[in-house]
Each structure stands twice: as C-alpha cells, then as structure tokens.
Image: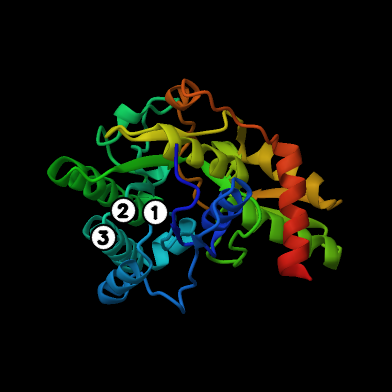
Amino acid sequence: MLDRSKTVFVAGARGLVGGALVRKLRTDGFSKVLGPSKAELDLCDATAVDAYFATHKPGYVLMAAGKVGGIHANSTYPADFVAINLAIALNTVQSAHRHGVEKFLYLASTCIYPRLAPQPMREADIWTGPLEPTNQPYAVAKLAGIELVTGFRRQFGFSGICAMPTNLYGPGDNYDPMNSHVPAALIRRFHEAKLTNASEVVVWGTGAPKREFMHVDDLADACLLLMETYDDPQIINIGSGIEVTIADFAAAVKDATGYGGALRFDTTKPDGAPRKLVDSSRLRSLGWTSKISLDDGLKSAYAAFLRDVAA
C-alpha cells in the first residue's frame, strides 16, 4: 500500500495522461502531488531535474511526460520525437534513482509493438519485428525508456515498472489540428464542422484499421493499481478491450458532437498499423477492468473540449 502522506511527482502533469493521474491521486487521498509546468521545470534540463528532486524528495514518481503526436507530427519532427523523449526519460530516471524514489512508473505506448504483431498484442511481442514506420521515432524513444528503467532495476535494484497504455482520449488532450492524435483531431474537426455547417468531414485513410480506445480516467485508475500492487520487471499492458474500426470511431465522435453532415475518407492518406489491440489479461488478473464505455467517454471528452478549449 502506498503511503498517502508521501510526495508524488507526476511528470507531464499538464498533459492528457498526467492531468488524469493528478486528478486520480488527489481523489484517492494523496495530499502532496507535484505537477510542475514546463515553464517551472524543463525535463530536458538534467541539472534542473536533479535540483527539483533534491529539493522536493518525492517518494513516488509517475512518468507521463514526453513529446507526443500523430502520423503528421512523427513524420515532420522525427529528431525531436527521439531526442526529447530520450532526454526526459534519462533525466527523470537518473534523478529518481539518485534521490531514493520508492516506486517509479514509466508509461510507454503500444506503438512499441511491431507493425504486424499478432493480435491481441502480448507483452512478450516487443522486439519481435519491424515497427510501424509512421510512428517509429516515438516508438524507438519509448523502447529505449523501457530498457533504461529495466536496466536500472537490474543493475541498481531500482523499483521501476513499465506500463503500455492503449490509444487514449479524454479531458486535457492536445487538440492542435496538425499534431494531435485521432480522437482529439476528430473531436475538433466535427465541432468546427458543426459550427460552420460544413457538408462533410474528411478523415484520413480508409477507415478500415482497428484501434482500441480507452478513456484517460480509466488509465489513471489502472496506474494507481499498478503502483499499489505490481512490482515486476516485465512490462504490462493497459487496455480497455474496446476495439472499433476508425470508421466506426469517427461515427461515434460524430454522434457525440452532434454533427449532422457526412463522413468522407481520404484514401490517399496513410492508415497506419492495420490493427492495434493489446492483451490486458495480466492486468485483469490483478482485478482491474475498464469502467467507462466509449459512448459515455466521448460525451465527457467533448464536454471537456467545450469547457476548456472551445469556450
């Protein structure tokens, strides 16, 4: 059981995942939750990160920071995706080890799995084949982060664990029209189409690829369970089991936003991996299941968009 009186540092607290982690920790009774902004702490600055750990002495760290984005962002900024994510992981893990952090959770991504990995993807499937080219820079950096945490665990007894969330959506997402992931991009696109009475919304690709989606508050719930109960060097998947085609997901977003026009798929644009579903049986064996349905989750995500972005 984690000590609720200890300080918890959430790296990336102003993002989609970090924000959900902060909400969950505070709801669950943690009174000292640190979530500095990038202006307050640049995680790429090793000296600043080490000084922060020395000053605040967190007992627990949840690592949700990083440069993220979809297909366009990965293809446009490949060097940034590798360099920034590597720097953040190295600085945070080294400082956590140096200053005696008791438990460390590193959040990676299902993009670490091979493009044609067997479905559903098991934890043992990493390193078994080529990555999906459209997000390879990010995936390579995340794989290196996993190796960093497990290496510190083997060499120094560092109490670090690594988890692989599936595709996420919810409050606090990045809605940039060029650099966002599919859920946020579609929410914004349908909202703007509704405002302008556009006759159609164009979605990249064929709509055929299948994706598993999970509300970020479900992820936060699973992460706290892992911090409480999981201490194994093997990575562990976090998935909802809710798998739909991109076409069906786009239709669900359309319904959630109340857009009344048509959908059109631009088949000249890339699809990405044909299917991404994780095997979360190890997590379920710990007693966890997803609680938020796709329809309810999208409605709450759109409400958060209206409150925080569109207002």
Mark 1 or mark 2, which is nearer to you? Answer: 2
Name which residue type carries label 2: Val
Q: CA distance from mark 3 to mark 1?
A: 11 Å
Kind of residue indicated by mark 3:
His
Instruction: Tell me residue 35's x, y (percent).
Output: 50, 65
Q: CA distance from mark 1 to mark 2?
A: 7 Å
Q: Where residue 101 is drawn, which disc sits there?
A: 2
Q: Secondary structure at mark 2?
A: loop
Evaluate if marks 3 and 2 touch, with contact meaning CB atoms under 8 Å apart: yes
Residue drawn where x is 49% and y is 35% of the image:
225
Q: Is residue 8 above or below residue 309?
A: above
| Mark 3 element type | loop
* Residue that carries the numbered disc 3 in the rendered image: 99
The residue type indicated by label 1 comes to Val
x and y, in percent, of residue 252 in the image: 74, 41
Q: Is residue 260 above or below residue 118?
A: below
Asked which quadrant contains residue 200, the reply is bottom right
